[in-house]
Amino acid sequence: MAAPQHPTVGIGRPPATSPPLEMLTPDEPQWLWESLRYQFWQPPDLARSMRRAGQLEPEQREAIAYWWSLVAAVEGLGPRAYATAFVRATEQHDSDQVRWALLAMLRDALRHEQLFHLAIQRLVPGWPVDYQPQTAVGRHASRHLGQVDQEAERCWHGYQRALDQQGIGVVSGALLLSALATGDLYEHWASGCTIPVFATAFRHTARDAQRHQAVLRALAARGWPLLSVAQRSAAAAQVQSTVELLSVVMLDPASGQPDLPGDAAASQAACQAVLGGLAAEQRHELLRTALLQIRDLQHRYHIPFPAMPHLAIRGTQQDAAQDAASPRQAGGTQGPPGDRPWSLHPSASAGAR
C-alpha cells in the first residue's frame, strides 16, 4: 500500500502565528516533529515564480543581490553549526528532543541557503564571482562581500572550536543573536517587498527564524546553568564575535568608502523600490534590539556581556571573579521557569547508551 502523501507548503502565505510552545508537554515538541516531517516549503517552487518577478533596473538587481548576499553570509553559518552540533549530540546520546530540534534547524538552514542561491542567480547570473558589476552599487558590493566572507569564516572557526570542545550550549547565544537579527530583517522585508514571490520567501524564512529562536532559547535555558566559569566566558566571546560579523553586515555598508560617497543612498533607493529596505538608523536599532535581548538573557544565567559603545549598549557588571564567587554558579541555578518555552530533558530512549 502506498504511503499517505503529505503536501508540502507551496508559495502561499505561511501561517502567521508562532508554534504554541506553551501548550507542549516536556517530552513531545509536537509542532517541531510535525513541521520537520510534513510542513515545509520548497525553494524551487519560489524560484520558478521569480521568473515572473517583473522588470528591474540593473541597479535594483545588484542592490537586491547585494543584500541577499549579506544575509546569506550570516545564514551560511547555520548548516555547518547545526550539523556539527547534531553529530556531537548524537555521539553523546543526547535526548531525541535535542537531536530532532537540531536536525529541524539544519534542514531550515539548508533551505535558506538554497533559496538565496536560486534568488541571486535569477537576479544576476554569476554573482558575485563570475559577474561584472554594472553600477556603483555592484562595484562596492564586490569589495564589501569579500570582507564579509572573511569575517564569516573567522566567526565560523570560533563556533567550530566551541562546538567540538564544549557543545551547543556555548554557541546558543551567538546563534540566537543571528536568528533574532535575521528574523527581524525578514519580517520587515516580508511586509515591505513589492514583489509577491520575494515577500512570500521572506515570510517563510521569518517563520523558520521564529522556530529557531524558540529552540535556541530552550537550549540556552537547559545548558547555560551547567556551564563552568571558563565556558561562560567562551559563550560571551562567541556572542561578541557574532556581533562583529553582524555589524559588518548590517551597519552602513558604505562607511569607510570615500570613493563612493553616493553608494549608500543609491543602494538604499534601489532596495527601497523593491524590498522596502531599512535605512542605516533602522538597521542600527534592529541590531541593538536583538543584542539587548541577548544581554538580558545572559544576565539571568550569569554570563558576562561586554559593553558595545558603537551600539550604545552598556555591559553587565559580571566578570569571571564574580562568577566564581557566585553561589548560583556552584548550584547550577535554572533560570526563571518562564524562560523555558519547553523542556529539553533527556528522553527515556537517551538512557540506553
Image (cartoon, rainbow, N blue to C red):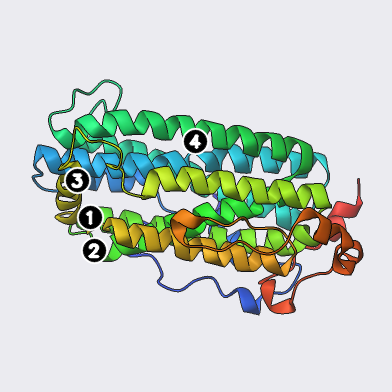
The amino acid pointed to by label 1 is Leu
The earlier-in-sequence mark between 1 and 4 is 4
Whole-number angstrom distance, CA of label 1 to CA of label 4: 24 Å
Q: Residues within 10 Å of mark 4 (few under 14, many from 20)?
A: many
Q: Which residue is at a point 49% across and 36% down the rendered structure image?
A: 152
The amino acid pointed to by label 2 is Gly
Query: How far across and how far down the image is residue 66, in percent?
Result: 28, 39
Q: Residues within 10 Å of mark 2 (few under 14, many from 20)?
A: some
Whole-number angstrom distance, CA of label 4 to CA of label 3: 22 Å
Residue annotated with mark 4: 152
Q: Residues within 10 Å of mark 1 (few under 14, many from 20)?
A: many
- Say if mark 1 contacts mark 4, CB within 8 Å: no
Q: Which residue is at a point 69% across and 64% down the rendered structure image?
A: 317
The earlier-in-sequence mark between 1 and 3 is 3
Whole-number angstrom distance, CA of label 1 to CA of label 2: 6 Å
State the quadrant of the C terminus: top right
Query: How far across and how far down the image is residue 257, in percent?
Result: 26, 36
The amino acid pointed to by label 3 is Ser
Q: Secondary structure at mark 3?
A: helix
The earlier-in-sequence mark between 4 and 3 is 4
Residue annotated with mark 3: 267
Residue annotated with mark 1: 275
Q: Is residue 39 left or right of residue 59?
A: right
Q: Please state which of residues 237 and 29 is positioned toward the viewer in this rendering.
A: 237
Query: How far across and how far down the image is residue 9, in percent?
Result: 40, 58
Q: Secondary structure at mark 2?
A: helix
The earlier-in-sequence mark between 1 and 2 is 2
The earlier-in-sequence mark between 2 and 4 is 4
